[in-house]
């Protein structure tokens, strides 16, 4: 069964407004005048990380992936609950060290959680619930308006290229593996963008797939200019910047950048904000009436790739 | 590495008062004058449930185990975030059905979460974060006073006997498997007890182990009268009520009853409250200066069993 069908089957139990119909990156819970943002992500060995990834990096990524969801809602990190499957002494110690570093770097406390034993040979599996506090409006995925521009922070595809270099598929330039292992959630940018944007989410499963999700949630079509997808120098050195390289970047996932919609009139302000943060904001497309995703290059329609990103599908039972 | 060592290594990151030093069943977060209680539990196929347990019951148990932690803090359930590993269509559908039933039964909404694919053959692994609201004092594990009585709700050992009957080890009487598969968190009792008790927690890993944890957290010794451990009729029919049967009940775990400490002067009030709820409260021991657990029968010291309950230990790496 795939992820979408399962989530659809759960929507009937998500009757609380905080759930946002299970259609957003996070839950938004009003408590005594304070706005809490809550998200939960799981990561599984062999799926979200490699068996020989350093344990400290796995901990970092678990924290970063969750904080990226908080960032996309403009929330400041507050605390986390950890679900942890025990390994051997050394692995557990290294994971705990990386967890402490990540929590410290993002100014959040560990509030609680659970540790479990797994059967021998089972993949390590971790969950983290992150809790943040929003002090202003909390953008959803669903607020984009026809005519809005689509923007993205930073550069896209670096983590995907880093993974391919770890797998020996390409010779990756410096910095790409770092972006795969130690992503930086865009917390500050998220808080500054939240009052300006009409919709925001993070790019975790692939730029094209996530852009389509934003368009669908907003009841619109989205057009993306392939040539405007921002690539890092390392990505260009490793994979080039032709159409194939840009498609690889736009479908790889694990970017943890912010994807947002904003009225055209805000373009100057947004570019200045990105400059102020030292994090480039790139305008990569626009929204219009309709319901699909279109890719264009130099004004010409391009065929869509077979997969727009990463979707969780399990074909067989265990 | 075992659970205790790992948790100890995390305590340095749990600097927020909401974390209660990672020494309690749940985090207690004050937000704008409202007291939120947050807990996260994981369950793993082959460890916490059997591969042929009905998926709807697995969902129920996941919800119930988390709500039992909320109950122990006197909190009313509010919402949950689910971490879900996808299976085949039928399993996922049945799980979703059971989840909806459990959430509905306890009046809580699904607020969000994550679904992941697992590698083929990996054990199904689920996490749930439950969020509750406390309207009065939130008892910790650590507040028992010397001279307090130790009490427990309901009957002990039924779920353990139910599991043994599913495994074909014993012929289990009616109702025991139901208590293993569909535990009832003591939410109402927890809310009524919270203002009365000096310490409270739920019995999940075994009565003796959990009683020792309460005593250690409170800096006290605890004495338990073996003969006063409450057994159900089904348990007595299946396993008898001799010393061995009582020890089995007191170390089996999965009870999801409430264990609490209260001054002797409250005994009459507590017995009346149990009667009012239709849930017997049994006085099973008392706290005193010291640091150990003692088992007595008819005034005589009994030897402690090798294992006081279930602790998560993973001997080998995967």
Image: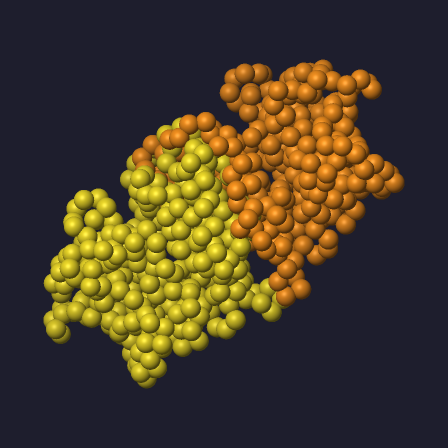
Chain colours: A orange, B yellow
Residue A134 visible in this rendered orientation of the protein: yes
- At 32% across and 70% down in the image, what residue appears? B279
Residue A199, given in percent of the width and then of the height, sits at 73, 43
Q: Nearer the viewer, residue B74 or A93?
A: B74
The answer to whether A289 is drawn above or below residue B22 in the figure is above
- At 52% across and 71% down in the image, what residue appears? B135
Left or right of B154? Residue A10 is right
Left or right of B308? Residue A4 is right
Q: Quadrant of residue A289?
A: top right
The answer to whether A41 is drawn above or below residue A29 in the figure is above
Quadrant assignment for the C terminus of chain A: top left
- At 37% across and 36% down in the image, what residue appears? B123
Q: Nearer the viewer, residue B100 or A135?
A: B100
- At 49% across and 47% down in the image, what residue appears? B82
The answer to whether B166 is drawn above or below residue B225 in the figure is above
Residue B265, given in percent of the width and then of the height, sits at 32, 84
């Amino acid at each position: 069964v795939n992820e979408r069908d399962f989530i659809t089957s759960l929507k009937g139990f998500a009757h609380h407004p905080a759930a946002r119909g299970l259609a957003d990156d996070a839950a938004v819970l009003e408590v005594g005048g304070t706005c809490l943002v809550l998200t939960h992500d799981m990561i599984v060995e062999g799926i979200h990380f490699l068996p020989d990834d350093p344990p400290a990096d796995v901990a970092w990524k678990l924290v970063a992936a969750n904080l990226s969801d908080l960032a996309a809602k403009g929330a400041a990190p507050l605390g986390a609950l950890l679900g942890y499957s025990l390994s051997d002494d050394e692995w557990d110690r290294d994971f705990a060290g990386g967890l402490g570093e990540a929590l410290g770097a993002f100014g959040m406390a560990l509030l609680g959680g659970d540790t479990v034993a797994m059967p021998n040979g089972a993949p390590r599996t971790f969950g983290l619930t992150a809790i943040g506090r929003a002090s202003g409006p909390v953008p959803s995925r669903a607020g984009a308006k026809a005519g809005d521009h689509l923007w993205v922070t930073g550069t896209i595809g670096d983590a995907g290229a880093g993974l391919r270099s770890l797998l020996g598929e390409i010779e990756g330039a410096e910095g790409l593996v770092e972006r795969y292992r130690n992503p930086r959630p865009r917390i500050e940018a998220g808080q500054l963008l939240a009052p300006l944007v009409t919709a925001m989410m993070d790019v975790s499963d692939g730029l094209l797939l996530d852009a389509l999700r934003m368009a669908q949630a907003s009841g619109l079509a989205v057009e993306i200019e392939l040539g405007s997808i921002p690539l890092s120098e390392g990505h260009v050195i490793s994979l080039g910047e032709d159409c194939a390289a840009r498609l690889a970047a736009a479908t790889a996932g694990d970017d943890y950048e912010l994807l947002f919609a904003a009225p055209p009139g805000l373009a100057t302000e947004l570019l200045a904000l990105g400059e102020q943060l030292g994090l480039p904001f790139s305008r990569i497309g626009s929204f219009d009436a309709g319901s699909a995703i279109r890719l264009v290059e130099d004004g010409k329609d391009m065929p869509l790739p077979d997969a727009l990103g990463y979707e969780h599908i399990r074909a067989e039972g265990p």
